[in-house]
Amino acid sequence: MTVKNQVQLITYPDSLGGNLKVLNQVLLTHFADIFKGGVHILPPFPSSGDRGFAPKTYLEIEPSFGTWDDIRAIGENFDVLVDLMVNHISKQSVYFQDFLKKGRKSEYADLFITLDKIWEDGEPVQTDIDKMFLRRPLPYSTFNIEETGEEEKVWTTFGKTDPSEQIDLDVKSEKVKQLLTDFFTNFNEQNVKIVRLDAVGYVIKKLGTSCFFVETEIYQFLDWIMDLANSLDIELLPEVHSHYSIQYKLAEHGCWIYDFILPYQILDTLINKSSTTLVDYLKNRPHKQFTMLDCHDGIPVKPDLDELIDTKDARKIVDVCLERGSNLSLILSDEHKAEDGFDVHQIRGTYYSVLNCDDDAYLAARAIQFFAPGVPQVYYVGLLAGENDYENAEKTGDGREINRHNYSVEEIEQSLGKEVVQRLLKLIRFRNEYDAFNGEFKVLDSAKDEVRLSWEKDALYCRLFIDLKTNKSVIYYIDEDGNENRYLL
């Protein structure tokens, strides 16, 4: 499997029309030539929470979304990418439910991390926990075993509830390795081409560390799972939100990585009308990346951009986004906040809204994304230039829902009538079809209030020029007849 250097869609299974069947119809009707790179379907599996990210199993599709037949039907025309929450599984899974009933006698007991696997006597030590990168107040949950009445503490990295809905898997266990092998084998049978390893940075738990991206053990696990994926002709995309240097280590290890730095850098460039930091970044970043501006969570800030941004400047950007209706996800661990207390993990809002619904600024942002080397992904809300859904966020109590609007077929068709959406589709077609994007990338010298990027291959070239004073963008390119053309975005 070779990942195509063309634009991919990111969508929930029910966000473009309500289910997988309708999603396929929408794709074939409106976007057949748009998402030539594939479709990332956010978790379509039975789940007990976190909008699919607390899966009960990967062997079935949530019936309200459809069936594996529907996934395979989409896969006939688009490479399908799905998530594997390699760190955890649902509390409601048959595996953990059996453990809750039988405790250590359960055939699945070794799938999970009881605290005696971490601390010899099974008693947590606060000084160890203080060193950890926490996603909830404590890294474990307490459960009562039905048959014995005993209390069991089990590792749970994530989860808003107590006890958590997301139970960590022990990747050192042979039983977990077999389970993951079963899941991947099924993906292969269902024509899944790419698997995103969600939360892979948390899989190794080791005392004295942050329990996040623990070297060298993380590479041993990655090597094992990459070998498994390769044997089934599946590409892997590890998802790690962390200091950019960790991403670069993954790249050096031969992995695809996510460019979680680019969305903020582009935002900073367009708000401050200065390309200085963006230009430096584009000159030095690894090329084997998936790029995005928006996603189902938010625009990453800390820890992804630690040491790349000044927190005083970042606070100003955050304030602008808040004025434009965004909300924030904050860092929990004091140790991981900036010295001045800056604690923004992600900025949550649609990318179109954080750019003040300015069509030219939005097209400029997409143009930079598409010119940055890598496989570009476009989130479904961004595809339709969606605006902040305050009602959804308020109704659910989850700030991320501001950027998770579910579109009916009618709403999709209305959105396609917007000029900004048609301009974006034209730009995606250019990115998909112009062969110079398979050539050599250059960051051209430019004034501080401009962006100049180019791609060259043989006699073809395309050059992007953005005037940050006006947000107007133009692409100069050589056509099939050897003539230079000008494409105003």
Image (spheres, rainbow, N blue to C red):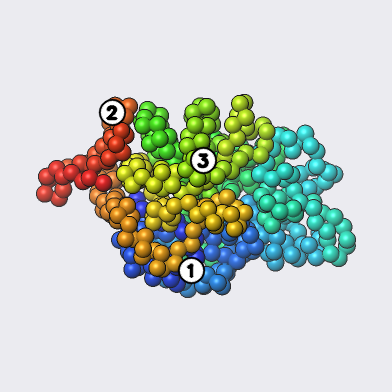
* Residue 293, percent from left and from top: 43, 45
Residue shown at 67% from the left, 60% from the top: 90
* Residue 289, percent from left and from top: 42, 44
> Which is nearer the eye, 122 or 223?
122
Q: Which residue is mark 1?
A: 18
Q: Residues within 10 Å of mark 3 (few under 14, many from 20)?
A: some
Residue shown at 55% from the left, 69% from the top: 61
* Residue 241, percent from left and from top: 55, 42
Residue shown at 60% from the left, 35% from the top: 343
From the viewer's perspective, tell me whether residue 198 is left or right of residue 381: right
The image shows residue 2, relative to residue 266, as above or below, that is: below
Query: In this orientation, does residue 415 appear?
Result: yes
> Which is nearer the eye, 458 or 409?
409
**Amino acid beneath label 1:** Gly
Q: CA distance from mark 2 to mark 3?
A: 31 Å
Q: CA distance from mark 3 to mark 1?
A: 30 Å
* Residue 389, percent from left and from top: 50, 54
Q: Which residue is mark 3?
A: 322
**Amino acid beneath label 2:** Ser
- Which of the two discs, 1 and 2, labels the residue nearer the N terminus? 1
Q: Secondary structure at mark 2?
A: loop
**Amino acid beneath label 3:** Leu
- Which of the two discs, 3 and 1, labels the residue nearer the N terminus? 1
From the viewer's perspective, tell me whether residue 230 is left or right of residue 375: right
Q: Are marks 1 and 2 in contact (CB under 8 Å)?
A: no
From the viewer's perspective, tell me whether residue 50 is left or right of residue 79: right
Q: Are marks 2 and 3 in contact (CB under 8 Å)?
A: no
Give residue 422's quadrant in the image: bottom left
Label 1 vs label 2, nearer the camera: 1
